[in-house]
Amino acid sequence: MKLNLYIMIGILMLTGCKDSIEDIDTKSVKRWEAIIASDYDEAYSYFTPGYKKTETVESFANKLTNAKLRVEWKAVKFVEKSCESEEICDVKLELTYKYKFPRKAMGEIELPSVITEKWMLKDGKWSFLPKLDYGV
């Protein structure tokens, strides 16, 4: 009887250590919610370990601060995901943002846009893998 209990506890502990594929839905939205709230440390925490070796949180925060001079991200919504393997998934999100035109007289416009992000399972944890041409 005790042996069965220990086995059950061991199984629960092991399964609790690894992110499930459903975690991507939540993590991708939480990352953008952190960006919207200007919580750059939190947003940065979702990057892959390899990417974190190439860009500091300060550099990441500076990029977003500069982007927010023209763009104000307002809301994010999970759309769908498609996985090419158990370790790599593409996540589609709908971002609503406000764009401020360079000339004040032109005003601003609020639009939704669907973006696709790549997420990677590394060491049991799902992380955001940015494209090389943008860092958010």
Image (spheres, rainbow, N blue to C red):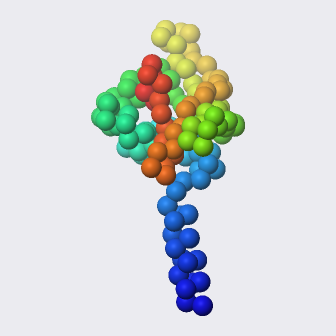
Front residue (pair 128, 31) = 128
The quarter holding residue 54 reads top left
Write the residue at 55% across / 41% down: 87
Horizontal relation, residue 75 to residue 126: left or right: right
Residue sitting at the far right: 80
Task: For residue 117, say whether it is visible.
Answer: yes
Residue 13, above or below 37: below
Write the residue at 56% across / 70% down: 11
Which corner quadrant holds the N terminus?
bottom right
Horizontal relation, residue 74 to residue 63: left or right: right
Name the spot of residue 99 as percent of width and height, x first: 55, 20
Name the spot of residue 62 as percent of width and height, x first: 34, 29
Task: For residue 93, say whether it is visible.
Answer: no
Front residue (pair 3, 103) = 3
Name the spot of residue 67 as percent of width and height, x first: 43, 23
Front residue (pair 129, 107) = 129
